[in-house]
């Protein structure tokens, strides 16, 4: 029988729940602090195409520690890319900002929805970092943005990062690809570089000290030299098949 002076033991599960809450709190604080740092970066050098690489690292490197993920980044050659390309990436969740930011190569910008500009702080950073904002509901504006992006690939020593599924797959497998990335690559005659991230969403448990394992692997570039838009369906199918195979292998590691 427990006396009045004896305290109830704290259940182990409550410690884990506290760890989960603490991690999310630290991630939220980090998001605000990183936002302040990145705002200074983009105000000092607005629209510089290398801003995304710097901002991505500010967001990502501390966040990976807060999340408790064991990250295996197989991207050494990818980071050394010194010529324009279109990077196509699978998109799992909103955590991708913290997961993928550390591997963005030099002079690489991303394509996002125009509505992102109005997200407080982050939207202004995203815009001033030189990323491309597209109004998907306006076909003429979207086409013009694509033409400008193709010109950047050809003439401005700039690469493009595209979440090629067009939306988050929520860890349910690679979705069909959108055409935009492949149209740009063929029009500019630059290679496609597939970048694959393991399904961390399926295995990540923020209530554990070691919350899970993350693997990011860059595949060899796929040349588009000599291709026309007639070759695009085969190119998309080839890239999709390579990424599905790679992601399955990463998940099995």
Image (tube, helix red, strand yellow):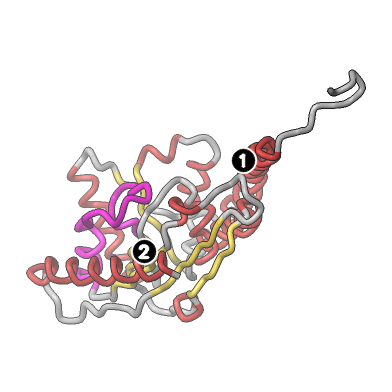
| In the displayed structure image, the side of residue 236 where residue 80 appears, left or right | right
Rendered image quadrant of residue 212: bottom right
Rendered image quadrant of residue 139: top left
Question: Element at badge 1?
Answer: helix
Q: Residue 121: x and y, percent?
A: 55, 39
User: Marks 1 and 2, Cα distance to the nearest angstrom?
Assistant: 30 Å
Depth check, front residue: 89 or 160: 89
Is residue 185 found inside the magenta-colored segment of the image? yes
Question: Disc 1 marks which residue?
Answer: 24
Q: Where residue 160 is drawn, which disc sits there? A: 2
| Residue at 21% over, 55% down | 176
Question: Is residue 7 in view?
Answer: yes
Question: Element at badge 2?
Answer: strand
Q: Which region of the structure is painted magenta?
A: 162-188
- Give the residue at the far front of this rendering: 1
| Residue at 49% over, 49% down | 95
Q: Residue 50: x and y, percent?
A: 51, 64
Rendered image quadrant of residue 155: bottom left
Q: Residue 15: x and y, percent?
A: 70, 39
Q: Compared with residue 63, is residue 220 higher up or lower down, i.e. above or below?
A: below
Q: Compared with residue 231, is residue 46 higher up or lower down, i.e. above or below?
A: above
| Residue at 63% over, 55% down | 68
Q: Quadrant of the N terminus?
A: top right
């Amino acid at each position: 029988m427990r006396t009045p002076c004896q305290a109830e033991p704290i259940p182990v599960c409550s410690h884990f729940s506290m760890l989960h809450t603490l991690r999310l709190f630290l991630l939220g604080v980090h998001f605000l602090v990183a936002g302040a740092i990145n705002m200074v970066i983009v105000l000092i050098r607005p629209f510089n195409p290398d801003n995304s690489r710097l901002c991505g690292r500010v967001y990502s490197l501390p966040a990976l520690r807060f999340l408790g993920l064991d990250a295996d980044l197989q991207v050494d050659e990818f980071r050394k890319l010194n010529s324009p390309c279109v990077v196509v990436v699978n998109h799992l969740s909103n955590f991708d900002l913290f997961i993928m930011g550390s591997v963005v190569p030099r002079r690489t910008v991303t394509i996002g929805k125009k509505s992102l500009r109005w997200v407080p702080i982050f939207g202004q950073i995203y815009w001033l970092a030189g990323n491309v904002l597209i109004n998907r509901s306006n076909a003429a504006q979207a086409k013009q943005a694509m033409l400008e992006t193709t010109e950047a690939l050809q003439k401005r020593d700039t690469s493009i990062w595209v979440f090629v599924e067009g939306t988050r797959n929520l860890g349910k497998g690679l979705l069909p690809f959108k055409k935009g990335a492949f149209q740009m690559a063929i029009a500019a005659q630059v290679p496609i570089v597939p970048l694959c991230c393991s399904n961390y969403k399926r295995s990540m448990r923020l209530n554990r000290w070691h919350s899970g394992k993350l693997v990011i692997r860059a595949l060899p570039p796929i040349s588009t030299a000599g291709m026309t838009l007639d070759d695009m369906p085969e190119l998309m199918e080839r890239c999709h098949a390579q990424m599905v195979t790679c992601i399955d292998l990463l998940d099995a590691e």
